[in-house]
Image (cartoon, rainbow, N blue to C red):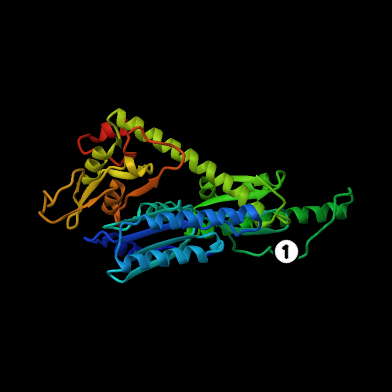
Amino acid sequence: MATEITKITADELKQLAQFWSNQGDALSLYFKAPEPPTDLAHREDLIHAKHKVKEALGKLRGNSPADRADAERMLERVVEMKGNGRRAKVIFACAREKLWREFDLPGDFALRLDVGSSFTLAPLIAQQQGRRRYCIVLADRNRARLLLLESREISEHSQVLDEDDREKTRNTGTGKSVHLERKKEEKVRRHFTFLADHLLHFYEHGDYDYLIVGCRDETWPDIEAELHPRIRRIFAGRFATDPGCAACEEIQEKAQAIVDAKDREEEEQLVDRTVGAAAANGLGAVGLTAVMDALEKGEVRTMLWTPQPQAERRGASLCENCGHLEPEGLEACTLCGARMRRFPDAQEALLRHVLGRSIEVRQLHYTTLPQSDGIAAWLRFRAEMNTGQALAS
């Protein structure tokens, strides 16, 4: 049940994160193509989007012919896009280093074009880490379909299951029909058991993260009864549909609504838990300085942030050798003496620090953080707390 959705490899991401330009000529572009134009309104949306990209390109600080050539090449890529399979265009370029990395990726990327000493990776890392795979099973008493939903892309991964010797009889009260009806009910039970066993097999092999079921309301109890306890724990929700007639557009719309509701609920709970724990001096840290301190101590389980307007972004410095973080601009690291790199957006420095570590990163979409810098962290522990205090918090 493997999916072909594109992901940037860990090595590629590491190379992009390590790139640094003292000349400040690293270009980063994120552009989500509009839907293919089918009427005048859609065509106008596409023209407007291209105009915004062209306007942003015109404001680039890079003035060399090579920089302008890269900017024009980016614009050409945007103009050529016609829906792009609903995928975003993500480009990182530096003409001086003859570097050009272009990706077509699923996900919701806002239009963004930056130029500076480093590539803008926060939107990409958040999307890459936050991608969850939802198995959608559509089932009735005779057939089943399996689909995979990831980053708002849906794909079919199984055909309708064939059943041998289907019985279409009804119970009319005769001995023969009762026997056939019982045979039919046993076959239905085996059908749902077969489906449930395969769902468990796919989950144990890492093919998906959560389960969504689409079925008629009267069928759900029969399906639910056969689900393994491990699958019940990852059950995200269900929607009513006719499995034999449902189109992919309908399936995706209903399943995505379940995914969005789950994401919102989880995010709100995480933010409430983190902010509340920080106020109680428990397993939470809010604000750039507090999060940096927790990262340096290895306390962070999940780092979360709200994207900030450019005028409100705070900077941070990162040691290129040991990964030490500082909120101020420093020439040399206070720990190892190596050069410090200054990032105008603190998120970029923090994300490079956590890259490759067992730390989850979450970009917030539905909630905001109380601090103006929009950064917080849920912690594994607090170094100054004993085990009993940590558990009580």
Q: Quadrant of residue 142?
A: bottom right
Residue 80 visible in rendering: yes
Front residue of 59/113: it is 59
What is the total number of numbered labels drawn onto the structure image?
Answer: 1
Q: Nearer the viewer, residue 294 or 340?
A: 340
**Residue 244 in which image quadrant:** bottom right
Residue at horizontal 23 percent and vertical 39 percent from the top: 289
Give the camera-side residue of 270 and 163. Answer: 270
Q: Residue 226: in sight, yes or no? A: no
Of helix, strand and loop, which one carries label 1? loop
Q: Quadrant of the N terminus?
A: bottom right
Residue 145 horizontal/vertical position (percent) = 65, 59
> x and y percent of residue 284 in the render?
31, 36
Q: Farthest residue in the bottom direction?
A: 98
> Percent from the top left, x then y, of residue 340?
17, 53
| Vertical relation: 291 (above or below) 116 | above
Q: Residues within 10 Å of mark 1 (few under 14, many from 20)?
A: few
Relative placement, left or right, of 358 versus 3 is left
The image shows residue 238 at horizontal and vertical percentages of 62, 45
Determine which residue is flagged by label 1. Answer: 163
Label 1 amino acid? Answer: Glu
Q: Residue, x 44% and y 40% (percent of image)?
A: 267
Which quarter of the rendered picture does the C terminus lie within?
top left
Left or right for 133, reference 19: right
